[in-house]
Each structure stands twice: as C-alpha cells, then as structure tokens.
Amino acid sequence: MKFTQQHEWVKAEGEIAYMGLSDYAQKALGDIVFVELPRVGDSLIAGQSFGSVESVKAVSELGAPLSGTVTQVNETLEDAPELLNEDPYENWIIQLDISDPGEWDALMDEVAYEEFCKNAH
Amino acid sequence: MPTSYIPNTKAEQDEMLAAIGVAAVEDLFADIPEAVRLRRDLNLPPARSEGELVAHMQALANENASGTCFAGGGIYDHFIPAAVSEIIGRQEFYSAYTPYQAEMSQGTLQTIFEYQTMICRLTGMDISNASLYDGATACVEAMLIAADVTRRNEIVLAGAIHPEYIAVIKTYARFRNLRITDEITDNCAAVIAQNPNYYGLLEDLETIGQAAKAKGALFIVSVDPISLGILETPAAFGADIVVGEGQALGNPMNFGGPGFGFFACKAAYMRKVPGRIVGETTDANGKRGFLLTLQAREQHIRREKAGSNICSNQALCALAATVYMSIMGKEGLRKVAELCLQKAHYLYDALLATGKFAPRFTAPFFKEFALTYTGGDIKTIYNTMRDNGMTPGIILPDNGLLIAVTEKRTKAEMDVYARSVR
Amino acid sequence: MNQVIFEKSIPGRSAYSLPACDVPARKTEDLIPNQMLRANVAELPELSEVDVLRHFVGLSQKNYGVLSGIYPLGSCTMKYNPIVNERVAGLDGFTGTHPSMDCPGNLRLMGELQAMLAEITGMDAVTLQPAAGSHGEMTGLMIMKAYHEKRGEPQRTKILVPDSAHGTNPASVTMAGLQTVQIKSDLSGNVDLDDLRAHIDGQLAGLMLTNPNTLGLFEVNIQEIAALIHAAGGLLYYDGANQNAICGITRPGDMGFDVIHLNLHKTFSTPHGGGGPGSGPVGVKQALVPFLPVPTVVYDDGSYRFGGDNPDSIGKVRSFYGNFAIMVRAYAYIRSMGAQGLKAVSENAVLNANYLMAGLRDFMKIEYDRTCMHEFVASGLPQKEQGVSTLDIAKRMLDYNVHPPTVYFPLIVREAMMFEPTETESKQTLDALVETMQTILTEAAENPELVKTAPHNRPVGRLDELKAARKPVLTWDQRTP
C-alpha cells in the first residue's frame, strides 16, 4: 500500500489499482456525509482533482494518485458515506486501470507517510 | 457628531477613548496613509430630519406614473393580503441575519422549510432551495447545473423566452463558455422553456421535454407560479429543474425588484443545487428543529470550486410568498388563477371587438396576451391612457401591446380600457 | 410543539378573500386544453386568517432581530435599520410601479443614488443592477475580464485573492470565468508583499482586496500594492463588505481601486431580511465605464433616463434594474445622514470596535493586537485547549440572549470569533457584552459541561447537523414518518 500527499492510499493488483482515504484523512475531516464519485470511463491524470469528500462543514478534494481510467466506483458510498469513517482501508473509493506504472515511485510508503503525517500538524 | 442613530454622547466617547488609551478618534485611523485620507467633507446633500425626509420621498413617489396596471411581462399586479405585510414587517424577521445560529433563528428556518415544501407541491418537484435573486438568474443557475452534470456546453432556448431572461442568460453564457444554439444536438446541456411564454401563450411542454430527453439534455422550465393554480405541473411533462420569478406570490411590483427566483428540481441534483437549503433535524432531546444544511456545496466552504457564488437568498420575499400561499390555501390559489384566466379572456374579446386590434397568435393563453394595434401609433394611445391613470400594457415591436390581466382588474376597468381605444 | 403549518391544516378551512368573477364565466376546458390543466390541485395548507397569523407571529418569536439586542456579527454590519426607511420604501408610489412604467421619481432616486455612492467611494460611475454583494463581485470581475479582452489581452485570467478573504471572492472569480490564485497574509495580518510580487506575471488580471481586510485591519501598504498591480497591467478590485469603517475617512477610488462593490445591506443600513434581499451596486473608474451592465441611469437635458447603452457592455446580470426597494432605503439613509453623519458612522463604528476589543483583551486572546478598524478577531484557542470550543461559547451566548459574533471566519485564525459591534450600539450594550463574555469564559473554566451542552433556554437545543446532512429532509413530504 502506498500513500499520496493528499492523504489517500493506493493498492495495486496487477494493472488495477484501488484508492481510498487514509485513516488520518477521515479523522481530520470528521463525520463524512457525502462522497462525490467520478464516472466509470473517466480518464484521470495523476494529481488532478476528480471528486470530493464532504463532512458537515468541510470539503476535501480527491486527487488522482495515478494516471489512468476509472474502471469502477464504489457505489455503496453514495448511500453509506460513513463507511469511510468506519473502515477507511477496507472501503475503496475508485478502481483505476493505471496507464503509467512509473508513477508509483512518486508515492510514499507506509513509513514515509507516517512521518509525513507527523509533520502535517 | 451624534445623530439619532448613533447613541454615544461626547462624554461617553471620551470615556471610551480613555479606556482604549488614545487621545482622539483620529488616532484610531493612524494606519491609513495620509496620502489616501479624504481631507474634505463628502459632497453629499445636507442631512434631513425624519419629517423632511418623508416629505422628500413622498414627492419623489408622486412623480411616478400610477393607476390601473395592465402591464406584466414577468412582474404582475396581483392582490396582496394584509396579513403578508403584517408578518414581514416584524423586525424579528426583516432585521435578522442569515440563520447560521440555528437555535436563535428557528422562525426564519421553519418558514423556509415550509416555503420549500410549498414550492415543491406547486411545481411537482422533489426539492427546492431557499430562493435565488430573481427568475432570470434562477434560469441561469439551472443552466449552469445542466452544463455541469451533462458536461456539455450548448443551451437551447425553446419558444418565446422573456427578453430580459435571454439577456441575462447570454451574459453568463459568455463568461462560462456556453453557447446558445437553435438545434438540440448531442452536445446540448439543457433545453429551457418558459410557460406561459413571454407572450402569455401556453407551450407544448410535453413535446419540448421529449425532444430534450431524446438527446440526453436536461429540461428546464420557467413558470409563472400563479398559473400553477390551474395548470399542470412541469414535473408531469418531465421537467428536471423548474424555476421562475416568485414576485407574483405576495410581493409588490417595486419597479421590478426585489422579488425572488424559485428553484426546484429532481432529488438527483440535490448536491448541485445553488444557494441555501433548510433541512429538518432533531436536537439532543429528539425535539424537531430546522437548520441550513448541505453547506459543503456553498461558496463559504467550497470557495473557487463552488458551483455558484450565491450567498443570499431573498428570504424576506420568500417569506412573503409563504404567508401569501398560506392565506390563499389550495382553494384560494386555484381561484386566483381562475379569475385571471376568465378576466384575461374577457378583455381579449373586448379589445378585438373594438376593431382596433388584431390577434398575433392563436395558441391558448393564461392571463396575458399580445395584440397588434391597428388604430394608429400605439405610443399615442399608450400615452393618452397613461395620462388618464391606466398602464395599458407593455409596448412590443411592430405596434404591438402585451397585456396582462390579474384578478385585481375589474370588468369596469376593462370596459374603460376598451372604450378608450375605440 | 414546533408544528409545521401543514400539520395545522384543516380541510375546508380558508383565509382568502377574493372578489366574485364579474365577467361572464366560460368553462375552463374551453379556454385551455384539458391535458394542460392540473390533474391534482396544489396541496397548500388550509387555515383561517387567525391561524395563519398566529403561526407566523409564533415563528417570529423564535427569531432574533437587531431590535432584540446586540448583533455583533463580524463582516456583516448588523446595524440598526431605521424604521423611517421601511416606511418610505412602502409608499404606494414606489411599490406600485411596474418596470415598464414611466417613473421619473424612481429614475431620479436611482440617478442620485448612483452619484452619491460614486462620491462616497471615489468612483466615476455606478450600476445598481446587482442583487447582492456576491452578485456585485461577479459583475465587477466580468467587467475586468471584458476590459482585458477588449485590450487584446485575453490571457489575463488570474485573480489574486488573499487567504483571509471570504469564500465568495474565489467563487465569484470562477463564475466570471477567471482563476483564483491565493496569496498569503503576513504576521501583522496584511497582504504579504513578497508573496504578492511572486505571483505577478503576464497572466495577472487583478487583485481582489477587502480594506479594511477581514481581520478588521487596514492594509497599510495599500499604495504600494496598487502601484505593483497597476504596473503589471492588472486591475484592483475592492470588496466593499467593510466600507462601514471608512465613510468620509478614505475612499477606495483614492486608494487606487478600479472596481468596487458595496453591500447596501451593510454600510447603508438596509435590513438583512433573514438572508436577503440585498443589493450590491458596482462602481468603476472611467476606463471601465463602457463595460458596465445595461441599463444605467444617465442625466441629460435636465432629467434622468435609462441609458448607458454601449457595445462593450457585459450585458445584463439581472432582470430589470436591480432590487429597487432596497435602493429606496439606502437612498433615504444617505439623505438622513449627510456627509458629516456618514463620517460619524465610521468614526463611531471604529471607536466601538476598539472599545469592545479593549474590554475583552483582559481575558480573551486577541489575534492581531493592534488598533482595529470597525471589527476585530478574537480566538477561542485557549478555551479549546481546555475542551470548550468557539462553537460552544457561541451557543452559550444564545442563553444570554446575545447574538454571537461570526465564528470560524476568517479561516486563517483558529477558533476565530469576529466581533463587529457597529456604531448603533451604545457604551452600555458594549459593557454588557463584555460582562457576558467574561461570565461565559468563567463558566467554560469552572463548569465546561454547561457551556458544551448549550443552549439551554432556546426553543430547541443544539441541533444534529450530521443527521441533517447525511439523510437530508428538505420538505415536509420527504419525511419518512
């Protein structure tokens, strides 16, 4: 599992990647009330915003961790956004067919991310 | 220099300055560079006492045309029950701020919740916001949502849309890179129709709606809320978003503003709706209460990513509408619409019978219609009637006149109208 | 009981009073095709007139207005709304005018109001068309974009906005088809000049500034900022939200601003209405006059008329002429105050804010502890560290029948509480507010639960925002009983 500076996690299974929100992010946002999902087939560019996560009084952009095409979105989040609070690592947000595996190297591993979070205060 | 609205006396001001630790009020402005200080009095007319002000304002008001109004075109002279001004004249309503402190603003919040419900029942839609600036900008906001959800950039204006609305739509479209086109293509974000249209005629909403759907465009309908006393809801014809000017519901004409724009849509677009929305919830003891909700959509949180920059709603005008709809009730609003319909058709027939007017259209109409004057220059008759205390309508190109008849107009007034054009 | 009006509806009851139909009635179906007629009547509530009035009077009693007590909302300028202005705005000769009518009185009022606002702000021309402050912002930004395009510089699309700005600023930038670039504040709360310089390039369209800024502080470097922006080919936009601090003291036009908007419902005393209607006139310098929305009121041959038709105009931003009835109130206000009265407004607004700040300083954290203008920002951070948040303190204020200050704004101050007392409050009400704040902070220290569970004596307790946002119930018919 790797992490972005926007507090998202990415997990790879071959060409397919899953991404979600880190535990740090869900705690910082508080109770999540809505997830704005992209559409299946949308092509994303690493770093660019493709959706958002809302709590009562805050909104956080979702940035693409890697470039690629959206192959699935987690529709259960539409009715149950609280799943991102309850178990952020089990509940992915999108599934991505990645186009540039080289981009993986730019992401942080768990140790680096933990350090990053410590300095985020 | 104390005035009636500034309470502190010279002695109190001196005490306050001492508490702050400065010698003079001037010292509080020390941050302002001398080069930009205004070292003269503003060039404004001298201050007036309350009595002088009232006399002056009355004199200004007296300069305006007045009398029996047959002009419409989006702003209508409907009857307003006394209860409306009684309620909106209460300082707890008119002087209150936006209800961000919900527990101290349950009055405003509950009235907006009731307003939202009434607008939905009137239009047949699922949800409504707390209101927008006016009918034209409500149309624009609907158009922007359509462009957002369809990811398309063409807008089709179907039929005769109010020219003021078209002008506003064009301004926004220019800055948002949207194109106004005539044909519904695969790149069409929305088809916008107005019912009754600018000339008072009823549009075939079903056909327009189907044409929009066939290309995957949103169907936006701008309506006269009074007409919904008897006309079928836009929802029944497949509208995705229903907007309109709400002035006719309990607000005076006020030279065109303020009224309010209403905005209602299908539940699917809930998170895209611009402006304030009130929702129901409970407190810690399970007691029902109301608050502003879905705020993460709005500009104060989403900033440059917000779908709209609107902050205000026209709360007080929407409150007037809520009281108006409560006084009218389901039977009263139907009767208002029925009276408008009957009287408009009476005047239509009476004017054609003079032989000085020719019809312009044949489609059915509700409370407003357009005719061509054949008895000479329309401006001459318009000015004569105006000088006799009657506004006969709105002058249209090609010697035409757009005439609105509300429930306030009497048979006697209409007979005078018909006689004066003979 | 919090009953909504639909629960009070009794079938067959009515409150309306309408005339009988005095023309020969025809069958509805003969006038309108059946399929266009409503299948089901709109279910509006059925009540008597007394029922309706009691319902809404009861609701008004659950509200809080400026005559209920002090309303120190920062950036909102909740001053007294003079009763006489309500009275004159209700004159039949104004309210009964249709926008197509010949109304020389209305035109004169609008023409004179345009001129007075131009004088107060140091601008060359004013449009009254925008319906609210945010609408004015968008209009002003559209004018700036049109200006750059006309000069053959369409690449100028970048608007610099300080991080202390209200969210409306960047949202309006987007509406006008421009891009926001945020710039930092320095340690004293002013624009960071180095950061500003670093963001100036050939794409610069302009800078949006509120001055005094949203921290209640005057930008001491305003002349240098204006020179930098102008030298780079940009324009200066003035957000007039805080005009109440500077009437007759200084003018945005003299500071170097090219475009401004005003909020008539702030400085010019028109009521907030529970969230509107407002009015957001826009003023511009000569070079931008051709781009103003149409129509504006022009004066020639001894009378006022609608004009200003110009091929470069951005067009219309609202139907008709704007919120006329709000203009009537603002006009009446300026005519009541005169030049010296308006100056006294700003002097007393600033005096009151500094006096209140001095009273609170002993026991509250003041974020930028220097002379403020008409408002200042305190922070509840010390209390937050003890477990009582700014929100809790605000909710406790409700129990003392005081409207809280603006909270959690500006965003750059943690646990922000922004106080703006306005000039219409007396020394006594300010002293009482200081006392209330002291009482509440003592409670926060000694009995935090009392504060954290406030309010206790309002019609409802603290409301569940999470439930409202997750499963929104936006109409009575959306409830699942």
Image (spheres, rainbow, N blue to C red):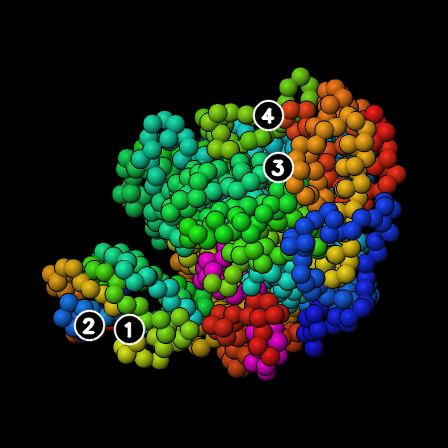
Same chain check for tags 3 and 4 = yes
Q: Residue at x 59, y 30 (%)?
A: C296
Q: Mark 4 lies on which chain?
A: C
- Distance from disc 2 to disc 4, alpha carbons, whole Å, reads 64 Å
Amino acid of disc 2? Lys
Q: Mark 2 and mark 1: span between their CA atoms?
A: 9 Å
Outermost residue to the top: C301
Q: Can residue C31 be seen in this view?
A: yes
Identify the residue position indicated by label 3 in the image: C320
The magenta region covers B269-297
What's the chain of the residue with tag 3?
Answer: C
Mark 2 vs mark 3, CA separation in Å = 57 Å
Determine the secondary structure under disc 4. Answer: strand
Identify the residue position indicated by label 4 in the image. Answer: C307
Amino acid identity at mark 1: Trp
Residue C159: name its quadrant: top left
Residue C413 horizontal/vertical position (percent): 41, 60
Say what secondary structure mark 2 lies in: strand
Residue labelled with disc 2: A11
Pointer 1: what residue? A92
Q: Between residues B122 and A32, which one lies in front from this camera angle?
A: B122
x 33%, y 33%: residue:
C154
Is residue A64 something one can see in this rendering? no
Using the rendered image, report if marks 2 and 1 lie on a common chain: yes
Q: Is residue B295 magenta?
A: yes
